[in-house]
């Protein structure tokens, strides 16, 4: 039954592709196309070109008009099925080109056309048993109607299909409500990299998750406590869009084996009581340091109560200037860690850094760098 459905879908893909070029002299399905050299490429080379074309992108399955949704036959890999019979056969038999996909949710559409939902299933089926790299994004603004995301029957159709393949997810980037939409826990045993929101984690079982990127988290200290910490025993790398002392501390409590933490934006929760924490695996941290005194105080507050014996490198998004150096020194003096490298992420080139302003840091770290370039400590005159 499944084979018959697959053959019918392949025929439908072929039919739409051929129909789109009817009456055109330059039609890719024209017999003259076989004379071009590109159509004489060995199948293995053609397959390799197809794989390279989707290797660094998320191929989009849907194309959106003002209030319409259609199949995206203008871009790989669907465009390969329209060129000629050879390309179509090679594309449909190359599972790797179908193992990456971006799906924009239909938004306020009441119900997704049967062809489009069948096309999504067909796309996923062509990937065979390969791990999936998946990106779920909101619909373009012009396609939204009075229906909300949650109320859209079309969204429900798409998400149900994608979640049914969670067992093959390897890398996933999902918008809000994607995982919380599920009626039961989502088992994703192959998932290693995930970009999502804290509230999405409560139903996710991903025992091999290694990289986690959290966007726009809110009420982290309460929401995340409901997750099962054993699920994330392999977590090594955490990227936070917003970080405060409480966020960092809570993350270290939950993810016992973290090796790196990256934060894009700093916030302050000064005065929030918390216990001391010793984390035995954290090796690098990347944190912002803003000119705003409130956020600067929040930066110092992150390290209160932290004992990080393995921390080797601290990267700070800040200028290597006097006030910033003073703030960092306050942290390094009080922190229970032994940094080897302090790196400034700044637009100021190394040649314009005043070494005298940075000099105090050499008493606390072995090496100071600017975007990875080593800042040489000024030579001291020998005693006379």
Image (cartoon, rainbow, N blue to C red):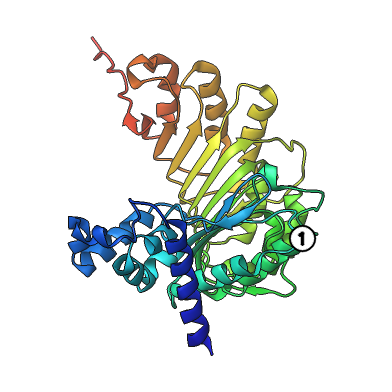
Residue that carries the numbered disc 1 in the rendered image:
110
The residue nearer to you, when weighing 296 against 307, is 296
Other-residue count near label 1 (Cα within 10 Å), few / some / many at <14 / 14–19 / ≥20: some
Residue 39 lies, in percent from the top left, at 22, 61
**In which quadrant of the rendered view does residue 347 lie?**
top left
The residue nearer to you, when weighing 33 against 359, is 33
Reply above or below: 349 against 115: above
Query: In the displayed structure, does residue 348 sit left or right of residue 120?
Result: left
The residue nearer to you, when weighing 173 against 211, is 173
Residue 118 lies, in percent from the top left, at 58, 72
Query: In the displayed structure, does residue 86 sit left or right of residue 210?
Result: left
Where does the C terminus fall, quadrant-wise?
Answer: top left
SS for callout 1: loop
Residue 200 lies, in percent from the top left, at 69, 60
**In which quadrant of the rendered view does residue 272 lie?**
top right
Residue 282 appears in the picture as rendered: yes
């Amino acid at each position: 039954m499944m084979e018959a459905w697959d053959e019918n879908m392949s025929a439908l893909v072929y039919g739409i592709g051929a129909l789109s070029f009817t009456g055109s002299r330059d039609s890719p399905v024209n017999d003259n196309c076989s004379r071009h050299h590109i159509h004489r490429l060995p199948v293995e080379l053609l397959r390799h070109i197809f794989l390279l074309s989707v290797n660094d992108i998320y191929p989009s399955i849907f194309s959106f008009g003002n209030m319409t949704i259609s199949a995206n036959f203008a871009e790989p890999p669907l465009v390969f099925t329209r060129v000629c019979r050879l390309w179509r056969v090679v594309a449909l038999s190359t599972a790797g080109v179908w193992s990456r996909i971006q799906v924009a949710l239909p938004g306020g559409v009441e119900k997704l056309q049967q062809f489009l939902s069948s096309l999504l299933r067909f796309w996923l089926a062509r990937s065979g048993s390969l791990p999936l790299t998946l990106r779920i994004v909101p619909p373009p603004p012009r396609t939204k109607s009075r229906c909300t995301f949650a109320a859209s029957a079309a969204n429900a159709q798409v998400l149900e299909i994608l979640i049914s393949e969670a067992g093959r997810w390897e890398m996933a980037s999902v918008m809000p409500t994607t995982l919380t939409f599920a009626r039961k826990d989502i088992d994703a045993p192959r998932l290693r990299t995930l970009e999502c929101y804290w509230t999405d984690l409560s139903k996710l079982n991903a025992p091999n998750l290694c990289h986690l990127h959290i966007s726009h988290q809110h009420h982290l200290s309460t929401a995340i406590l409901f997750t099962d910490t054993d699920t994330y025993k392999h977590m090594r790398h955490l990227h936070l869009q917003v970080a405060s002392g409480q966020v960092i501390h809570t993350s270290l409590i939950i993810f016992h084996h973290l090796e790196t933490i990256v934060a894009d934006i700093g916030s302050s929760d000064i005065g929030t009581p918390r216990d001391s924490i010793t984390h035995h695996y954290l090796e690098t941290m990347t944190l912002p340091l803003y000119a705003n005194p409130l956020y600067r105080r929040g930066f110092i507050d992150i390290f209160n109560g932290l004992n990080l014996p393995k921390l080797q490198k601290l990267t700070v998004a800040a200028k290597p200037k006097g006030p910033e150096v003073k703030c960092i020194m306050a942290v390094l003096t009080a922190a229970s860690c032994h940094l080897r490298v302090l790196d400034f992420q700044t637009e100021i080139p190394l040649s314009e850094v005043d070494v005298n302003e940075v000099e105090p840091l050499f008493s606390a770290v072995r090496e100071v760098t600017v975007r990875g370039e080593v800042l040489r400590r000024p030579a001291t005159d020998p005693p006379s």
